[in-house]
Amino acid sequence: MTENSFPGPMSMIQIDGQKIKLLREQQGLTQLYLATAVDVTTDTISRWENKRYPSIKKENGLRLAEALNVELEEILDSTKQQPEPPQEETVSSVSKIQGPTKAKVKTWPIVILSTTLFAVILAFIIFYFQSTPSPNYGANRTAPHHFISGQPFPVVIELTGRSEKENAFILKEKIPENAKILQVAPEPSGKGSDQLFLKWIAKIKVPATFSYVLNINLTGENKVNLTGTIATAGGKEQAVAGVTEIHAGLHHWADTNTDNIISDSEILAVYDKYSAIQGFEDEIDLIEEIWMGDGYRWNTQTKHYDIIE
């Protein structure tokens, strides 16, 4: 591989925007998917594809190639690397001496055949991607409807769909202000400074589960909103369905009917929905203690649960 490199501390490469756009469309990927994978904006991806930014950082080029499932060489602009072959000059000079008729007789059948073959391949690609239905995907959020300010509570998001193969997803969850993230599984893809979002980008099979645990200290408001989006390769971005609003109060989040008792059905619901969350064992143990007792009260002075024996 030969790369167009520029002197200086930052290594640059020259990319072929048409190749990038063709590879993206052949795989049914969106500009949003590539932008998230490379950590740039969709406008930047559009400029790359339209050759308005022919030179980019090599680091971004490697990320872009990985997102397109190809080697870096396949997205480089090869026209900048290869000098014109010397025999063209010879052919041109021969044509001048012998006349253009012979060259045209030999060249045009090849041109026509190549054009026809390219048109057939292009028509097949367009027909294949338009006739192949995209699987329907969705995301649903499960979370308690209430919590105690300053105490942890879980959120689970399940991706659903109809496909037996792996597909690319981008899942984003907006984190409420003053929230502390205690646990996240699997590990988020984004490592940036923006702490108001959890972002995952992955190629996985559905169904798949994502979860996180929050601790929120509320001062004025008595509720928080949870919002998020899911985007799939070749599909539109859509909102995560399910619970979107949680109210603060004086009852444990597992006490769904707020009667200061953890019943059999309530603890079974906890095990069914939240027991697989990594690092959530202490909270599950607390719920078991409350369930084994006769009830509980939230002590606003000590900030602990008083379990009634």
Image (cartoon, rainbow, N blue to C red):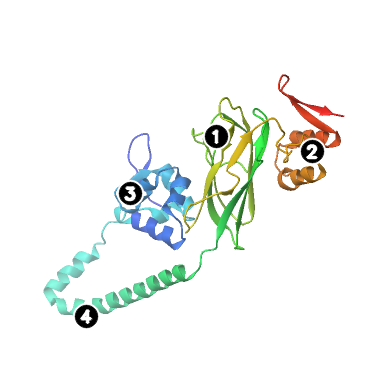
Of tags 4 and 3, which is closer to the observer? 3
Q: Which residue does the numbered mark 4 point to in the structure image?
A: 105
Packing grade of label 4 (10 A; few <14, some 14-19, many >=20) is few
Circle nearer the viewer, 1 or 3: 1
Q: Earlier in the sequence, mark 4 or mark 1?
A: 4
Dot 1 corresponds to which residue? Answer: 176
Return the x and y of residue 20 as percentages of the image width and height: 39, 55
Along the line of sight, the residue nearer the viewer: 161 or 21: 161
Q: Counting residues from the N terminus, which is met first, the one under dot 2 or under dot 3?
A: 3
Q: Earlier in the sequence, mark 4 or mark 3?
A: 3
Return the residue at label 2: 262
Q: Residues within 10 Å of mark 3 (few under 14, many from 20)?
A: few
Q: Is residue 199 visible?
A: no
Find the distance from the CA under tag 4 to the CA under tag 3.
41 Å
Q: Is residue 283 left or right of residue 158?
A: right
Say which amino acid is labelled 3. Arg
- The alpha-carbon separation of the residues under discs 1 and 3 comes to 33 Å
Question: Is the Cβ of the residue at disc 2 closer than 8 Å to that at disc 1?
Answer: no
- State whether residue 54 appears in this view: yes
Q: Is residue 211 above or below residue 115?
A: above
Q: Residue at x 19, y 79 (%)?
A: 102
